[in-house]
Image: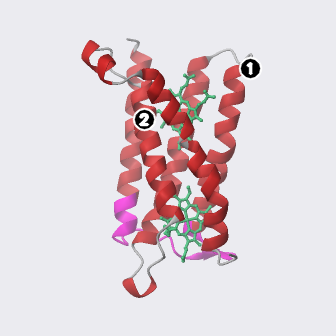
Amino acid sequence: MKISHHIDFLIAVSIVIIAVVFLLLTYQRIIRVNFFIGPLRFSHWLSIIGTIGIAIATPLFTLLKRSFFPSWTKITRFHIFGNLIFFTLITIHFATQVARPASNFPELGTGIAMFIAMDVQIILGFTQRFRSQRRLYKKLININTNKFIHASLVMVFYAVILFHVLHGLKII
Ligand code: HEM
Ligand code: HEM
């Protein structure tokens, strides 16, 4: 296996670790992201950037993959690192929400559904891209099933996000 593959794995894992650190620091209120910028809190701006990023980068990846784009590796790196960075921004928004005091706790629903679906999608992204070459592993996980579930889970995001934003902003 190429050294660049191992480096990609290290970068991807590092972004996940950074996301977890931000999650914990925000949850413990060591980092504060609930100040206002314009009409919205900073944590909401982060979620908006993360959401728009995933919403645009995912179909763009699909299009580029099927076009004459010369390098599968480059485009897959864009997919993996880009989505992981957008996911980190969304994680900060998630942490601010679940850290709210009991008196002001949000009604968990659409947001939690998307967050769980996205976590599973990311785990399956890892098993898709960085799968072990060992025979036992190959027997345990069918790579086509893995790819199918990984790709399909994005539908949870697209189906729910509009309702989440409209409900969160008290429009519906
Ligand atoms: C994939 C992206 C997102 C995830 C995973 C997510 C996650 C969450 C979670 C877990 C909550 C707690 C309530 C619930 O479970 O529904 C929440 C609340 C909220 N989210 Fe998001 N969110 C995302 C994107 C956004 C975006 C783009 C906005 C736009 C501003 C937004 C605005 C809000 C607001 C205003 C609340 C508070 C709702 C309340 O007070 O009842 N979220 N989010
Ligand atoms: C929320 C984040 C993510 C979303 C929404 C997402 C979505 C998708 C979708 C829709 C596809 C199918 C693309 C196509 O064939 O047209 C795909 C493929 C793939 N994804 Fe993700 N993904 C995410 C994160 C990740 C992560 C973190 C990894 C790796 C660590 C990853 C690795 C892959 C790989 C290897 C493929 C298959 C590429 C190929 O065979 O050509 N994804 N993803």
Magenta-drawn stretch contains 6: no
| Figure check: 140 above or below 43 | above
Disc 1 and disc 2: Cα gap in Å? 24 Å
Give the residue number, with chain letter if any, for mark 1: 67
Is 163 above or below relative to 126? below
Residue 125's mark? none
Q: Residue tagged by mark 2?
A: 124
Circle 1 or circle 2, nearest the eye? 2
Q: Which residues are magenta?
A: 23-43
For label 2, the SS is helix
x, y (%) of residue 94?
47, 63
Q: Are marks 1 and 2 in contact (CB under 8 Å)?
A: no
Could you tell me which quadrant the C terminus lies in? bottom right
Disc 2: CA contacts within 10 A as few (<14), some (14-19) or many (>=20) = many
Q: Which residue in the rendered view is the most extreme toward the bottom?
A: 103
- Whole-percent x and y of residue 125? 46, 33
Residue 119's place in the image compared with 135, above or below, is below
Helix, strand or loop at label 1? It is loop
Direction from residue 11 to residue 165 in the image, left or right? right
Query: Amino acid type of disc 1?
Result: Ser
Q: Quadrant of ligand 1?
A: bottom right
Q: Position of residue 149 (x, y in %)?
A: 49, 35
Quick check: is the Cβ at mark 2 less than 8 Å away from ligand 2?
A: yes
